[in-house]
Image (cartoon, helix red, strand yellow):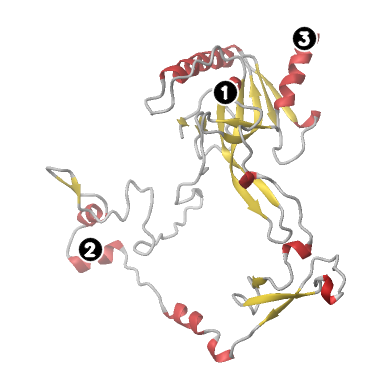
Amino acid sequence: MSNLSDRSDQLKILLGRSVYVNYPSVHEAKVIAVTTETEEYRIKDINNPINENDVIITMYDSSTSRKWKEDSENEQLLYKKGRRIPGTGGLVIGPITIRLRVLVLQGMKLDYKTGARKKVFGKIEADIPMQLALWEPICDDPRFVETSELPIHKLMPIDSEVIAISGKLKGFIGKIVGPHSNTSNKRIINDKRVVDVEFIIPFANDTNFGYSIASSITDDYLSSREVCRACGISASVLGKLVGSIFIEPGRYDIGLNLKRNGQYQLIGYIRKVESNDLSNNSDQWLSGDTVTVIGSLQHDNNDENNNDNTNPEERSYW
């Protein structure tokens, strides 16, 4: 019993820490779950600090345990032989006894009010063998270093230029004039996060001409029925024209490609008509993480809370 308790504590220590995956193209990722043949340890809330009460432990039944072992043996073989994609094979990793579920770093988010930079991790989980995770980076990347809140006199130095992003002065360029001036002006540094900005306001009759031009430009759209009637063609012919039409030999596509497989619309040429059916709230544009790695799992979009490790719909390889 003591050995099981020690093993549990060791697995929990891995949760929430950063590892570096996708060797040799190393990417930082955050561990949100650890799985073995018999159990899973998962962070309850990835945005909060981890304590004993924030770890969800799931014990596997015999079928789930058997599937985990089969998947691990298959992954061991795929890392050696490859996945029919250059660069995905050639690694002899040995038996897999522990797997990590991680979220890959997507980039940095800057808080414009405080100057703080925070890491942004993705939403698509990657399931990787623990032996393929590095605990420390090969070399530090200064682009992905979090920083704390900056003092106002460093965030907005005196005489620096700024641009208004809201209010009546939106779009105007200004210059920081205080109150945290340099020591030559013998003005004290202000502790409050407030600065004085000097804007140069042009004549009133020149300020809004761009808005007038933009508001006067409107696009006219016709329904597919109106287009068919105006062109004297059937709806089926129109559907082929706005899609794909392949010409042989050479298989050249001479269609307009305004839509393809119903997956996207070409903005400026086609406007989406809202349906009264509110049951389908899915996005019209495909969404997902910009950066994915070997082992990333794609689940059914209609099941956002799908935590089933054993039946991923698709694996993405990057």
Image height check: is 246 above or below 125? below
Specify few, some or many for label 1: CA neighbours under 10 Å numbering under 14, 14-19, or 20 or more: some
The tag on residue 228 is 2
Looking at the image, tell me whether mark 1 or mark 2 is earlier in sequence order: 1
Q: Which one is closest to the eye, mark 1 or mark 3? A: 1
Front residue of 264/184: it is 184
Looking at the image, tell me whether mark 1 or mark 3 is earlier in sequence order: 3
Q: Horizontal and vertical percent for residue 60?
A: 63, 17
User: Identity of the amino acid at label 1?
Assistant: Leu
The answer to whether mark 3 and mark 2 are in CB contact below 8 A is no
The answer to whether mark 1 and mark 2 are in CB contact below 8 A is no
Task: For the N terminus, give its image quadrant.
Answer: top right
Q: Which residue is mark 3?
A: 3
Please tell me whether mark 3 sits on a helix, a strand or a loop: helix
The tag on residue 132 is 1
Q: Is residue 90 left or right of residue 72?
A: left
